[in-house]
Amino acid sequence: MPFIPHTPDDIAAMLATLGVDSIAALFDEIPPELRVGAQALDAIPEARSEMEITRLMQSRARADGEPLCFIGAGAYDHHIPSAVWQIASRGEFYSAYTPYQAEASQGTLQVLYEFQSMMTALTGLDVSNASLYDGASALAEAVLMAVRANRQTKSRRILVPRALHPAYRRVLHTLVAPQGLELVEVGFDPRGGHTPVERLEAALGEEACAAVVIAQPNFFGILESVDELTDWAHAHQALAIAVVNPVALALLTPPGDWGAKGADLACGEAQPLGMPLASGGPYAGFLCCKQEYVRQLPGRIVGRTLDLDGRPGFTLTLQAREQHIRRGKATSNICTNQGLLVTAATIHLALLGAEGLERVAASCHANTQRLGELLCAISGVEPVFERPVFHELALRLPAPTASVLNALAAEDILGGFDLDPDYPELEPALLVCATERRTEDELRHYAQRLAAHLERSPAAS
Amino acid sequence: MPFIPHTPDDIAAMLATLGVDSIAALFDEIPPELRVGAQALDAIPEARSEMEITRLMQSRARADGEPLCFIGAGAYDHHIPSAVWQIASRGEFYSAYTPYQAEASQGTLQVLYEFQSMMTALTGLDVSNASLYDGASALAEAVLMAVRANRQTKSRRILVPRALHPAYRRVLHTLVAPQGLELVEVGFDPRGGHTPVERLEAALGEEACAAVVIAQPNFFGILESVDELTDWAHAHQALAIAVVNPVALALLTPPGDWGAKGADLACGEAQPLGMPLASGGPYAGFLCCKQEYVRQLPGRIVGRTLDLDGRPGFTLTLQAREQHIRRGKATSNICTNQGLLVTAATIHLALLGAEGLERVAASCHANTQRLGELLCAISGVEPVFERPVFHELALRLPAPTASVLNALAAEDILGGFDLDPDYPELEPALLVCATERRTEDELRHYAQRLAAHLERSPAAS
Amino acid sequence: MLIQAQSRTGRRAYTQAPLHPPPVTTIPDALRRHTRPALPEVSELQVVRHYTRLSQQNFSIDTQFYPLGSCTMKYNPRACHSLAMLPGFLGRHPLAPETHGQGLLACLFELQEILKVVTGMHAVSLAPAAGAQGEFAGVAMIRAYHRARGDHARTEILVPDAAHGTNPASAAMAGFQVRELPTGPDGDLDLGALHAAVGPQTAGIMLTNPSTLGVFERHIQTIAQTVHQAGGLLYYDGANLNAILGQVRPGDMGFDVIHINLHKTFSTPHGGGGPGAGPVGVSRRLEPYLPVPLVGCENGRYRWLTESDRPASIGRLTAFGGNIGILLRAYVYARLIGRQGLARVAEFATLNANYLRARLQEAGFEAAYPERCASHEFILSLKREARELGVTAMDFAKRLLDYGYHAPTTYFPLLVPECLLIEPTETESKEDLDGFVAAMTAIRREAQENPELVRGAPHGLPVRRLDEVHAARQLDLAWRPGDPKENSSTHG
Amino acid sequence: MLIQAQSRTGRRAYTQAPLHPPPVTTIPDALRRHTRPALPEVSELQVVRHYTRLSQQNFSIDTQFYPLGSCTMKYNPRACHSLAMLPGFLGRHPLAPETHGQGLLACLFELQEILKVVTGMHAVSLAPAAGAQGEFAGVAMIRAYHRARGDHARTEILVPDAAHGTNPASAAMAGFQVRELPTGPDGDLDLGALHAAVGPQTAGIMLTNPSTLGVFERHIQTIAQTVHQAGGLLYYDGANLNAILGQVRPGDMGFDVIHINLHKTFSTPHGGGGPGAGPVGVSRRLEPYLPVPLVGCENGRYRWLTESDRPASIGRLTAFGGNIGILLRAYVYARLIGRQGLARVAEFATLNANYLRARLQEAGFEAAYPERCASHEFILSLKREARELGVTAMDFAKRLLDYGYHAPTTYFPLLVPECLLIEPTETESKEDLDGFVAAMTAIRREAQENPELVRGAPHGLPVRRLDEVHAARQLDLAWRPGDPKENSSTHG
């Protein structure tokens, strides 16, 4: 019996203790008409050995190939030190529960405290939680939190830039609309690709708003004028919610220093910090805020405290915000978060340090610049926007994006993110990314193949 | 500086403590004319990042392909449970030294004791050491040990079957010839493929011998009449040294039960117990013996003892045999052995248990039988020998073996071991193996491709 | 000592970052950071040693019996981990085209099918990232269903008082009012209260069955009929699905929507607090509202079904496809144990729970609902020990740690005073259960002879009992440069 | 508790063996086993839990400072492990054709080249499986060389009294007589004794330089000249190569043959006692005798060179190519640190050793050879502490374990009474060295104030001091079914 240790003798002895003659008797309270027979599960395959399933999974993993990846769009192909997952996969991290029994969970708790400390260092804010599901849902939690936290207005309107990741905007809608929040789209500048203050003004009109979402870099890789946007939000009694890439923060002004007073909340996707692409998850969202908002912060929070002997130790804290205490009035329903990924992120950040992270960021930036040079040397390919970028770049193509990407994919090159469905106003356009893992040879190979395909393609309208 | 933690401040403080102004000063005792400059190492590449070396190694690992393997010949492609290396790779096992400080090494020591217990259970002998380098060098140590241990004769002759693995015979020669041992080859029966007692008689002639080597199964996969061979050895005042496959021992009479008195020593290759093929190593040799010979046993041995409080614990024991105490008079020069592989083998055997190991052995046996059926259905292909086999089978081919194997290799099939160079008397002949990992589809694929190639080949002489 | 406290200026794990990054010249100075973030500057060895040692301070399934009620801490097969971590899966970008994802999508599609069969539901979406997100998705589907029918009056969700806290929290997240229903003395729902509560404002009811009291809700058919007749829908909280796999199916009980905690029932790791995965299953009428993406199969080719394929969907819950790596682990688990194995899970989880309860009762402990069959978990009440000896359930819990057992869940459910909620799971052996009984018995003896010993527990762990009140009052949530506090808990 | 003691008849880790093996019908009953071997019958969870917990009972580099002299316990980079364990390398059969091994062979060929350059030797074979096998191979080559010249009189190998025990043992394995040479009071070899010992019977001399006394043999050139003039060859024991990498090369010192412990100098894991790898390097005149297989390169294609290519070879040492996986790790290590990094190894290993010695001397401990520069290791003598306080080097060693430090090597080399041989390696930080000094100082204070505390150490480990005499007298080397002894050391 896979994973069940009971021997026939064990079963007999246990049933004897219970005074019943079969395990089935233990299910006597289930109405008999509801009991299903063995055949109810017939459509599920029979047990297979680990050897057989290993073969199956290896062949499926191989089937998906190892294409050369120039897609970013919210998930980034970074080097992950071998040590990260060798340690994070240790049974004591991997198979432990949420650290409810603090004394038996100091390993996980200290890791989470260190993670919180690292995230506050990166964002320049006071407090971090111990993770949320991913960047997009973290933004939704940030928005809900901002509405609760904003004492200056009862508005439930949120300004959301169109230059924010389209999937983030969708998730935001899914998660906050049921609570009656109104999401107001803020357009971007067609030449700069950024979100000017004037667009905020236009979107707000005469109304108030609870918060302004500011993505740095934005979905096009463009660097926003975050100081002005933050100050504008504060001038309008709105909280400023930063959506940031944690690797970029090695180079860019941290949200806590944006504008005169700093952003109020910062959130984002921690995937670039040691998490494999893995088809989209598990990743981890982070959420930081100013100290004054800590009691509105959703998710687990670890605090440092003292034990009976006065020695320092760590424990979950501020649990009064959480659903198992406050139930329907909790700051969020989240409980299980992304602890194992946070463990990986913490080890990853410890290995890189500030200088290492800066080297990664600078290499990504340089590779993307170089890719832009190579691609824009192809006739008909040009940058969509003028403003500087971090490590993604929107390019206008002389042919329909989807057909170009399909042709490249057939050669095992994932050429980037097709902007056309989400941004028809830019069509045909492509968003490319080159992380520090891409080599000069790979960039040239991409450019060479793109040029070849474009030569064969009919010009776009 | 890769893997060196010293900051400039650290270095300055340390040099100040030492009262010198540079690290170079610490090398002042080396004659200056011997000091090499930095350029002496110029032919060695510069440091590269882990990301770059990862890319390099991944491309080299991929370059070697994933051929379909029907080679056995001393290294076997078995399923290894995921748990084995996930646990054996834990830092506490991986980065610990030989357990000289027993109190700080109970993990490793208990594992070794458990391994010794498992090997005595498998071989039916009283005592096991904690590993040697590999099966072949373990046999050499067994032969040297037998000469020391045999009180009945001073002979330094050893009878070695020609049906023993050719590489084992070579290693034996390398390692025992310097001490003046004489290796006498014993032929095999051309029809049965086994080593009959009459051949032992013929090889011994009028001389005495210290030991007889008995391989079960032998290199051709053939099962020897081990009871007769063992009794013959004992009747001639020789010790019987068993060379056994540990997986086969799940099905076959253990050496301790061979003949009337049992084999005196049993050795072999532990690779089939959880060690990847890995191009040939690291593997681990094992060596077991009767209790009366324990003080002649080379290699580490772990014993169970008591601590100051009377609680049980484990420690290296019988170190008086070893080179760090006895120096030139030690039982062997071996000290570092294959501890990590033994850890893997112990976990592997614990996961399989006797029944699991028997299932593995039975599946290998059945797959090899089935492969023999399929291949012998091809015109001109037939078994070389008549006697039953475990999981390898010698086949006579209608074409030169090397050319057939090359043609198969070009299609990513490793068709077996070419017997022709080592056994020209059997030419053209091939030794095939199908472990439990091979599927019916793979067996059929092999048969189909072999048939196709043989159709195209000129018939062998 | 914190990793941050080990930092020394100029130290680093040299090989881990690009060795020769070019200078950054194209980012305007006004947008640049001017002081480096205070991340640790440490060597690779320091990092490896620090986190390896920290890991050793955790209890975990791989090291201890961990009978944490309602959490299903069963063995996480190591193969599930290594096969989900195959390079081909790990390297795949979430937005890679389906041409480069057939292997992955085949696994996910088959997992959807397995979950449909084992729960008796009509369709499944794997999108929710955890149980609570599954709950949200489920309740949001109930909302979408009523709205699609123009039934805007249904603003209320019924939740038993024994429910997990996430149930009311998720209902609130989805914009509903929560009305709590009482539990009867036998552990079943108070049907009278249910009848009184249902009405045209009832959007649905959220139930865990077996409930958090460790008993099967015997009137489930009546409840289903009552709620359905009132126009509401039934939500099944799958936290306790381990108890009934292959014995009875939520779909057959009349549930319209369920979530499944793969990190419980399908043995994916808990990871010190996640990641989880909370697929949702629905009856036919709710299928249009399933969260995206789903995996579809047409002519043997798999593809993601997204917003454009599923216009009525409640939408997207995370940026990409959810916790894919966890889904892969659950798939491997289901394939390894197969259909008979799925049914055995509930059988042996139930056998272990009933055996352990019986042994503890024999040993003199008081079980809640002793007249009922236990499901996969059961409740002890230590109110007598608390009253007579002054030793609480929390004291027992902490002292168990000294005995090498993780504590059961304490003080939940809220209905039973001084309770321990104990879930042994099917992967533990009889010897381990017997060992736990022996430890509980020994602790009670200690509580009689030397209660201070128990009240002061734990004694043998890296720290003694921690002051949670201090933690909440003197908030210390992050290390900062120059932090004067030393944390020596990890050494010695 | 032993895994064997956890066995229960009929229990098993079901998924790990083929589910439906066919019956075995073709093996004669006379050859069949009739009782199953007494292997443990346990569940997968039991195995995982048991060995995970056992691992936690080890000290290791990944968890502790481990200054074990002469063992070079430096950080083992995790990348070396994961890259050597890539599926393409692990799945390769040792007898796969070279068409399916170019990637592997490229790594091995380049490693041969790196080792040649860094040691200054003419050619390298990677075949020996560990240092001692490298020693055997080296001495066997010396034997082969003399024999090839018809010089059968050279039956003697000279070995200093400070040498590792493997040196004389390996010489004996290779059929030589061993003659021991004394060490002078300054730690260098007694040259007078050397001159007296050499002669036509001298096959060669085996030296470690720096020696096991932690000092560089200053007269190495004179020694080389003396032995060579007598017709002997020089063997370099590479155990201490970490001390001189990139500073001075054995080939330049006049050595004819060397072995290299990759598991020391090249940071491959020690694995609780191996695997190691002991490549040998030789001068031009010994090249024909190198053990097979070697890796050759012709026209950009790599191939194994075996017996048929190398007819004068001393032969084959293991069945296949040696400890290939360890060679891959060493290759990765060398590439990560590069040529400058190789030289830095010796610099910082030497800095750490000299610093630690100076700090311990400041703290009042007595160093052996204080007038000499320390190499990468050094010796403390605790004879004063033993005499005055009755607390021995072994007591200090055991008490260090309680402080979370692995003990240095004790009672080796044999020349210095009550000695600790301390090798910190280059990968440890100044703080860790300072911590070790503080621990040693604290233990001496304990030895003065409460010597029983130190003599009874360790106190905080899974077991207290173990009785080695009992172990050797009452041999208990294997568990057997029905074994009455219980081992409870792993619980509690």
Image (cartoon, coloured by chain):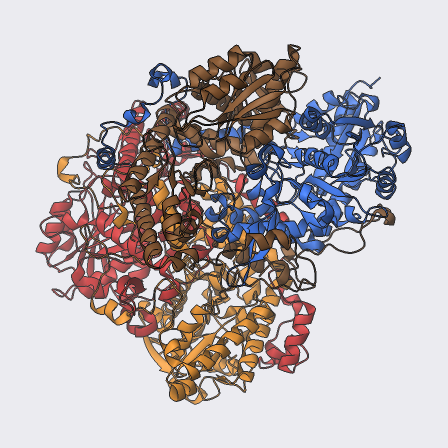
Chain colours: A blue, B red, C brown, D orange
Looking at the image, which is closer to me, A275 or B415? A275
Q: Quadrant location of residue A184?
A: top right
- D169 w.r.t. C23: above or below: below
Q: Quadrant location of residue B63?
A: top right
Q: Which quadrant of the rendered structure holds the C terminus of chain D?
A: bottom left
Horizontal and vertical percent position of residue C61: 42, 44
Looking at the image, which is closer to me, B457 or A208? A208
- D353 w.r.t. C219: above or below: below
Q: Quadrant location of residue D291?
A: bottom left
Q: Is residue C457 visible?
A: no
Looking at the image, which is closer to me, C425 or D34? C425
Q: Is residue D442 visible?
A: yes
Horizontal and vertical percent position of residue A190: 88, 29
- Residue at image x 63%, y 48%? B51
Horizontal and vertical percent position of residue D19: 31, 30
Tally the numbered discs.
Answer: 0
Looking at the image, which is closer to me, D78 or A325? A325
Residue farthest right in this picture? A198
Left or right of C41? Residue D414 is: left
Left or right of B268? Residue D90 is: right
- B435 w.r.t. D265: above or below: above
Left or right of C395? Residue D482 is: left
Horizontal and vertical percent position of residue C333: 43, 31
